[in-house]
Image: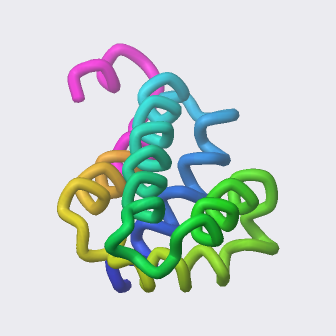
Amino acid sequence: MTGAELVATALTTGAAAALTGPARGTVHDLHDALRQAVRRRLASPDTTAGPYGVRVLDAHASDPDVWGTRLLRVLDACGAGEDAEILKTARALLRAERLPAGPAADAY
């Protein structure tokens, strides 16, 4: 899995888990942090994705099935899959989404 694929997977999984998962609060917070980090990366003057990339990110939030391929392309184009902060947050979100419910989850 490439870095861009990891980020896209985390954005998709986090959006669904934030609504229904047992670790809802943590997942929601990490999903928001990931979206903001990706948004900053897309809006950076150093990337070619620009405003189109931000629109794709927003559209993906409402319909991941339709926008998933385009999101992957803009993540790849802007280098999000190589950004250490974005990758760290994506991995943390995917780990948190898999946490069991209950007091043991708070230890993480």
- The magenta region covers 94-108
- Relative placement, left or right, of 37 versus 69 is left
Q: Is residue 32 above or below residue 54?
A: above
Q: Is residue 50 above or below residue 40?
A: below
- Relative placement, left or right, of 100 versus 18 is left
Residue 60: x percent and y percent?
70, 61
Q: Is residue 27 above or below residue 52?
A: above
Is residue 52 a member of the stretch shown in magenta? no
Task: Look at the image and tell me in which quarter the N terminus lies.
Answer: bottom left
Give the residue furthest to the top.
103
Q: Residue at x 60, y 61 (%)?
A: 54
Q: Number of callouts in the render?
A: 0
Task: Look at the image and tell me in which quarter the C terminus lies.
Answer: top left
Q: Residue at x 53, y 57 (%)?
A: 11
Residue 64: x percent and y percent?
73, 64
Q: Residue at x 55, y 85 (%)?
A: 73
Q: Nearer the viewer, residue 57 or 23?
A: 57
Q: Residue at x 45, y 30 (%)?
A: 29
Residue 2: x percent and y percent?
35, 84
Q: Nearer the viewer, residue 58 or 27?
A: 58
Residue 4: x percent and y percent?
41, 77
Q: Nearer the viewer, residue 106 or 76?
A: 76
Give the residue furthest to the left.
84
Q: Quadrant of residue 87?
A: bottom left
Is residue 95 a member of the stretch shown in magenta? yes
- Relative placement, left or right, of 77 versus 60 is left
Q: Quadrant of residue 100?
A: top left
* Applied colour scheme: rainbow
